[in-house]
Amino acid sequence: MVTEAQNIILQNIARHISLTAAEASHFLSLLTVQPVAKKQFWLKEGEICRHSAFVFEGCLRGYTVDVNGFEHILQFAPPNWWISDMYSLLTGNPGQLMIDALEPTQILLLAKTDQEQLYKDIPKFERFFRIITENSLVANRQRVIDAMSLSARERYEQFCQRYPTLINSIPQKQIAAYIGVTPEFLSKLRNTRNKTKG
Amino acid sequence: MVTEAQNIILQNIARHISLTAAEASHFLSLLTVQPVAKKQFWLKEGEICRHSAFVFEGCLRGYTVDVNGFEHILQFAPPNWWISDMYSLLTGNPGQLMIDALEPTQILLLAKTDQEQLYKDIPKFERFFRIITENSLVANRQRVIDAMSLSARERYEQFCQRYPTLINSIPQKQIAAYIGVTPEFLSKLRNTRNKTKG
DNA sequence: CTTTTTTCTTAATCTAGTTTATTGGCAGAC
DNA sequence: GTCTGCCAATAAACTAGATTAAGAAAAAAG
């Protein structure tokens, strides 16, 4: 029997590769479900990341904390998104990423060791993860460009266009920590939206 | 007969996968050499990127130009680096990246269509490009983190540590355009290096 | 419903980094 | 030679966004 969560991840994968019933079944057998309560951490700075996580309910956030204690959000992971500390996952070194839940969340875990074996057993997965990594890279490059060439107001407008569903479902301070301004300044931006003199 | 350029790219690939002689030979047959003169463009904003480029001599730079005409450098590509406008390459849409040569440069080109066929003929290449894309993603994420959490001086120091060979071989204005400050401010930074009063 | 905590807003002051302009050095072109 | 373009350095005026502080509003907890 296939659960709702399993259905969601199979559809996610079907966007790039097609699996036989046996392959799908084998893949599902490698996954474990894990709930993450609101504000609870899935990963902390200094820990070694040994899994890729697929969110099928709720929302996670990945962020770093700088020397002054300020949080900088790298990624939101609403349903259908993969998240991990890829640096730590690849190198086996302690990572600097904190990952916690903005709301009650459910994830599916794939261990790195199982993922590597999966590449050997079903090479199609090599393709799948290549493609989602490529997409992720494109998005990240765009973010570097935006950070360097757009003003705070423009970055906020970009965010609104790109993540329309998140705008009303997460606190503004989280958006501020994503676009790289203080919550105070974001508030000012929102209340002077293109204030043309008059 | 195998040229010097072909040797360099085969070694680059051997860092992640091993090829048989026949596979290596087939792969090499897909590549074409192209010289890029100093200041000459390999790719311009608005063009569609149809190749991945591997630099084996010289140095390329990939950058965007914002609405005010300022350049923002995303990537330097010294020998042994791959470069392309991945957004354009993946989607087939016109890209926003400009890629030109900082010095006389030689590259090997792999057409997108050949690359896709290569994935089918020799699945190991799926693995190779997955791995270098992963590494590239990790580096790009670190750059987002640095842009958000470090001061201009710290970003400059990071750059010095990370690209020690580039510091004395490229103009300072290029470094400024990479770390995201004006050349004037970079000059000020360099001449007040940790000026502890005294 | 009341209390506590978190989130949002407003406003005054402050600063890292920009803008604009001027200088001198140096390399290649004529 | 000297003319021209490019690069680095310096300085003063300027601005986007941070900091600080305080109160209002909303959400969560009890």
Image: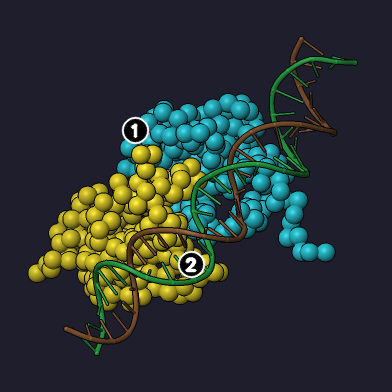
Chain colours: A yellow, B cyan, C brown, D green
Quadrant of the frame with the C terminus of chain B = bottom right
Q: CA distance from mark 2 to mark 1?
A: 37 Å
Q: Nearer the viewer, mark 2 or mark 1?
A: 2
Q: Is residue A14 above or below residue B91?
A: below
Res. B93 mark: 1
Res. A169 mark: none
Q: Residue at x 48, y 67 (%)?
A: A70
Residue A50, picture quadrant: bottom left
In the displayed structure image, the side of residue B70 where residue A130 appears, left or right: left
In the displayed structure image, the side of residue B91 where residue B172 appears, left or right: right
Amino acid beneath label 1: Asn
Chain under numbered label 1: B
Measuring from the top left, give residue B7's x and y in whole percent. Answer: 58, 41
Work out whether residue A29 can be spotted. yes
Q: Residue at x 61, y 37 (%)?
A: B59
SS at mark 2 in the image: loop
SS at mark 1 in the image: loop
The residue under label 2 is A70
Considering every residue shown, the one lying at the far left of the view is A1
Looking at the rendered structure, the number of numbered marks drawn on it comes to: 2
Work out whether residue B76 can be spotted. no
Quadrant of the frame with the N terminus of chain B = top right
Chain under numbered label 2: A
Local packing at callout 2 (Cα closer than 10 Å; few below 14, some 14-19, many 20+) is some
Amino acid beneath label 2: Phe
Measuring from the top left, give residue B38's x and y in whole percent. Answer: 63, 28
Residue B90, picture quadrant: top left
Q: Residue at x 51, y 50 (%)?
A: B14
In the displayed structure image, the side of residue A141 where residue B174 appears, left or right: right
Q: Is residue C3 above or below residue A18?
A: below
Q: Is residue A182 above or below residue B65?
A: below
Frontmost residue, B68 versus A18: B68
